[in-house]
Image (cartoon, rainbow, N blue to C red):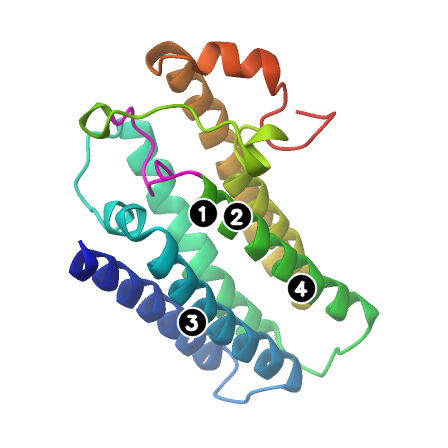
Amino acid sequence: MRKKAMVYLVRVLLQKIIGFSLYLAGAGFVLTYAGSIYFISLFAGTMIISLLLLKANEETLAQRGKTATSSPLWDKVLLALFWLLNYFVVYWLAGASETEEHLGIVYWCGMVAIFFAAWISTKALLENTFLESTARIQRDRNQTVCKTGPYSIVRHPAYSGLILNCIGLCMIFPYVRVWICMAITALIIVVRTALEDKMLKQGLEGYLEYTSQTKYRLLPFVW
């Protein structure tokens, strides 16, 4: 189990390295202070969160590393698009759009947003041992409904964190191309949330009752 979890974490780190490389390539290998601060924070945060999750939730990390699962076709398509846009395309676009420093209040608010987004997603992973990368009914793991922690506020807190991260990136890299990329990414997350929620209502015992207790999917009092 530990080996599978480590393989997953190495994949996550490699994903960040590729994203940084694409940013550099887009920027003509000129690194701004704004880019430097963001990516240093990204790598440091990734290492800290990885060590925390490895200690607290090794099994879930191992499961998240699976590339072949019984998830439906819509999930495979949406997940592939999400990964491409959120971890690779956005960084190339950000680098290609960089022209000058922009370390203003909006930038720092964006940094706060991505830290908070990472905290929400990490809390969700620590709380829910069934939070895999793919959307499926985990009968092989005797899946149950998680109702505690952030799951007592919204039904899909990890996705809430991802959308907040999209907003944060738009503030850190204030360029139209980045905004368009993140808007599409956020839309993919919303669609995936709706489809996954429907699947869980139909296939996971106790989930329908849970929806009557925790009424909102992503954002309290909105949806």
Of labels 3 and 4, the one closer to you: 3
- Confirm or deny contact between disc 4 and disc 1 (CB under 8 A): no
Q: Distance between the residues labelled 1 and 2?
A: 5 Å
Q: According to the image, label 3 marks what residue?
A: 47
- Pointer 4 or 1: first along the chain: 1
Residue 27 image position (x, y, % from top left): 52, 81
Q: According to the image, label 4 marks what residue?
A: 175
Q: In which quarter of the image is residue 87?
A: bottom left
- Work out whether residue 117 or residue 182 is closer to the camera in this orientation and state it: 117
Query: Is residue 174 in sight in this rendering?
Result: no
- Dot 1 surroundings within 10 Å: few (below 14), some, or many (20 or more)? some
Q: How far apart are marks 3 and 4 (CA)?
A: 28 Å
Residue 207 image position (x, y, % from top left): 44, 16
- Dot 2 surroundings within 10 Å: few (below 14), some, or many (20 or more)? some
Segment tinted magenta in the rendering? 128-138
- Confirm or deny contact between disc 1 and disc 2 (CB under 8 A): yes
Q: As displayed, is residue 83 above or below residue 39?
A: above
Of labels 4 and 2, the one closer to you: 2
Give the prevailing secondary structure in the magenta stretch. loop
- Pointer 3 or 4: first along the chain: 3
| Identity, as a three-letter code, of the amino acid under mark 2 | Lys
| Identity, as a three-letter code, of the amino acid under mark 3 | Met
Residue 209 image position (x, y, % from top left): 50, 10
Q: According to the image, label 1 marks what residue?
A: 126
Q: According to the image, label 2 marks what residue?
A: 123
